Amino acid sequence: MPSSLAPQPASPATAAEDRVLTADFPPPKAPSKPAPLWAIRQDIPLSLYWGLAVLGLLLPLLLWGLAAAGEVDPVFLPSPAQVLERMKAWWDEELLTDMGISTMRVVVGWAASALLALPLGLMIGSWRSVQALLEPLTDFIRYMPAVAFIPLVMVWVGIDEGAKIAIIFIGTFFQMVLMVAEDVRRVPMAQIEAAQTMGATRREVLEKVIIPSAKPALLDTLRVTMGWAWTYLVVAELVAANSGLGYAILKAQRFLQTDKIFAGILLIGLIGLVIDQLFRFAHRKAFPWLHVRH
């Protein structure tokens, strides 16, 4: 190798300068990795997830049991064991019938809302003219409490099953319309403009761009509004009901059967939890790319 190309040893002055610079400006440290339990929006081990989920369900029950173990009148706070005994007795009477009729009322009222709210929300979210025409009215009505419509529903629909379904419909429809419209408005305008640039018609933009892009959010909206439908069950069963979980809760209140009230509330929560998990399962199956772990 020619001497001119051979690496030259650093002079003492240059080596000293490098040591000073290194001391003044140390190399950046690698960021410390947070513990898996506290990493923001990162996956945790499946066993840890289910352990925390079980803990989150059992801890309130434990606190409830400890509170009821003291000198507390069961009329005010029955113990979990007393509620369980009442639930067993209710099972021997008509619990399955009450659960079935309440589930039917909620599902039918929610489905009727979805049948109308999905296309209406799609139009409000897609066309400003429809938004200007219908959104202010929907905003106005959705703040009206559903319970205030009970007298009108009894006059217009009667006191049969249709009245109970109508209350659940009123409680969910107007909220669902606005949520669907917001889901549609979140579709990026760049996708719509790209489709229009390639010659897509209005119908093709709706069918091939807006609806497919909004589907994951729409399914989440249906899941959320199903929960709202269950919250209107007790209100709906105020209308001349003689069966159902909400009716049983109201009847138990008249006779100070607090354990049955607790049992009814817990059963509604349990049914709602099962339905919610079914929606989550459907979301994972329909849109698996949104649930890929990185």
Image (spheres, grey):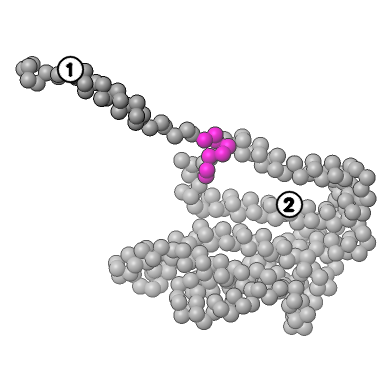
Residue 283 located left or right of residue 5: right
Q: Nearer the viewer, residue 91 or 246?
A: 246
Magenta residues span 34-41
- Residue at 75% of width from left, 65% of height from top? 233
Q: Main secondary structure of the magenta part?
A: loop
Where does the image place residue 15, in percent across and percent down from the top left? 24, 21
Q: Nearer the viewer, residue 121 or 204?
A: 121
Give SS at disc 1. loop
**From the viewer's perspective, is the residue at label 1 or at label 2 nearer?**
1
Crowd around label 2: few <14 · some 14–19 · many ≥20 (10 Å): few
Residue type at tag 2: Leu
Above or below, 8 against 265 in this view is: above
Q: Nearer the viewer, residue 222 or 129?
A: 129
Residue type at tag 1: Pro
What label sits on residue 9 in the rendered view?
1
Give SS at disc 2. helix
Q: Quadrant of residue 265?
A: bottom right
- Residue at 91% of width from left, 64% of height from top? 254
- Residue at 77% of width from left, 68% of height from top? 235
Q: Quadrant of residue 154?
A: bottom right
Q: Provide the residue designation for mark 2.
A: 270
- Residue at 67% of width from left, 60% of height from top? 227
Crowd around label 1: few <14 · some 14–19 · many ≥20 (10 Å): few
Q: Nearer the viewer, residue 27 or 277?
A: 27
**C-alpha distance separating marks 1 and 2:** 77 Å
| Residue 271 painted magenta | no
| Residue 39 painted magenta | yes
Where does the image place residue 81, in percent across and percent down from the top left? 87, 44
Above or below, 28 against 120 in this view is: above
